[in-house]
Image: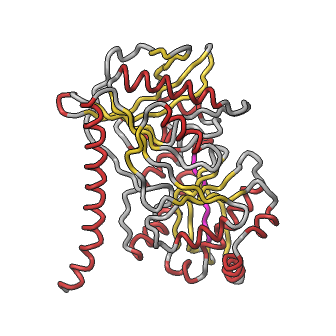
């Protein structure tokens, strides 16, 4: 089960880097500079708004290196932000689509967030990607309890058009900027009831790291996917690679619940920025009977409440409006948390050709995703009737 975000629609195709490939581009008093991906994570790992979708370790595990650009925005000799952007091109390179997902990064550590810098970063990226590279720029904003509205307003002010609204947009944020006893009081009453039930069983919680943590997580995830027959388009296979990333701060941690020595629930948790993100989670059949998911989530929340750097625990959303995950996550979000909708995707092009290509590429991938999901849902029923 993927709960990191709305459905992913990866775009395929080649990318021809525009010329000049190594020159820096300027917008106002800012400069856009390409960064070596080997240096990107070290440069941006301590930004408050860092997420895996804006890291080199995640993107290089998922996409061809030639389709990625690592763009830092500098002002007065200092990096104020940047973005990892994936670009694909139409046949004969007649049009380009550049995808900026869950970015840009604009809130460095040890500095107060400056919305003026966010404006400068957007303007510099528009100048580089839309005007110089002649790409249709598709921005997939992150949901954020504090900053999503500011980012959306800036995009609209700069002529971006809302081109797609993901379904089931609710995203759940647990407030962990409080002592654990206050977090417990915030929980929904039924959620606390299920937690107490889980605590009566002989369950053990442990944190694991690196390749060994991924190895414990993966079987539980596979057991759940098989049991529920979910259609999974997530990049869960990237976990093994990012678990051993060079930038230690970007390595996910693995929350594992054992019954005796058998893992029955597991989660991969991003601890890198000021929000901790529930990347993936699973319970097997035994763990489901033991309510091990409640036990695991409460152990995670207690850890986060003791980590001053982390403001929110981002639970993600659910795949559809009727999914039972909404009730579970709403109960954990509780009275103190926030339910924030995923913003729409925003697009901007420099001419009609780029706009048509960008919108058509997005629409084709949405259609392909839906067809793949329907085929996945249909085949088990068809095979059962044929047996």
Q: How is the image coloured?
A: secondary structure
Residue 326 or residue 161, whichever sits in front: 161
* Residue depicted at x 39% and y 26%: 129
Asked whether 253 falls inside the magenta stretch, the response is yes
- 94 over 6 or under it: above or below: above
* Residue depicted at x 65% and y 56%: 313
Asked whether 177 falls inside the magenta stretch, the response is no
Q: Residue 212: which quarter of the image?
A: bottom right
Q: Quadrant of the C terminus?
A: bottom left
* Image x and y of residue 57, in percent: 49, 40
Residue 314 or residue 221, whichever sits in front: 314
Which residues are the magenta region?
Answer: 251-257
* Residue depicted at x 73% and y 58%: 303
Side of 292 relative to 356 (left or right)? right
Residue 108 or residue 259, whichever sits in front: 108
Q: Is residue 60 something one can see in this rendering?
A: no
Q: Residue 185: which quarter of the image?
A: bottom right
Side of 137 relative to 79 (left or right)? left
């Amino acid at each position: 089960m993927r709960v990191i975000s709305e459905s992913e629609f990866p775009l395929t195709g080649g990318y021809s880097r525009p010329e000049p490939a190594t020159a820096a581009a300027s917008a106002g008093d800012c400069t856009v500079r390409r960064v070596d991906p080997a240096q990107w994570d070290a440069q941006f790992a301590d930004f408050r708004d860092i997420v895996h979708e804006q890291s080199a370790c995640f993107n290089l595990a998922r996409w061809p290196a030639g389709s990625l650009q690592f763009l830092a925005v500098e002002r007065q000799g200092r990096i104020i932000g940047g973005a990892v952007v994936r670009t694909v091109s139409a046949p004969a390179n007649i049009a380009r689509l550049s995808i900026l997902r869950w970015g840009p990064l604009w809130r460095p550590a040890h500095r107060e967030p400056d919305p003026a810098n966010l404006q400068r970063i957007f303007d510099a990226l528009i100048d580089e990607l839309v005007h110089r590279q002649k790409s249709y720029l598709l921005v997939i904003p992150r949901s954020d309890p504090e900053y999503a509205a500011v980012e959306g307003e800036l995009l609209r002010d700069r002529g971006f058009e809302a081109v797609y609204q993901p379904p089931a947009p609710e995203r759940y944020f647990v407030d962990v900027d409080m002592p654990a006893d206050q977090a417990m009081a915030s929980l929904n009453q039924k959620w606390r009831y299920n937690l107490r039930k889980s605590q009566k069983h002989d369950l053990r919680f442990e944190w694991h790291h690196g390749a060994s943590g991924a190895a414990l997580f993966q079987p539980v995830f596979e057991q759940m996917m098989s049991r529920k027959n979910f259609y999974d388009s997530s990049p869960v296979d990237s976990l093994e690679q990012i678990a051993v990333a060079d930038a230690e701060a970007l390595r996910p941690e693995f929350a594992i619940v054992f019954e005796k020595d058998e893992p029955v629930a597991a989660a991969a948790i991003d601890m890198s920025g000021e929000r901790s993100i529930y990347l993936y989670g699973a319970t097997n059949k035994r763990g489901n009977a033991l309510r091990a998911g409640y036990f695991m989530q409460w152990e995670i929340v207690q850890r986060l409440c003791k980590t001053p750097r982390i403001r929110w625990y981002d639970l993600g959303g659910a795949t559809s409006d009727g999914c039972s995950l909404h009730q579970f996550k709403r109960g954990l979000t509780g009275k103190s948390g926030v339910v924030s909708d995923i913003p729409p995707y925003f697009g901007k092009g420099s001419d009609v050709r780029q706009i048509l290509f960008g919108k058509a590429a997005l629409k084709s991938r949405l259609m392909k995703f839906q067809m793949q999901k329907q085929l996945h849902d249909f085949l088990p029923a068809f095979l059962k009737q044929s047996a």
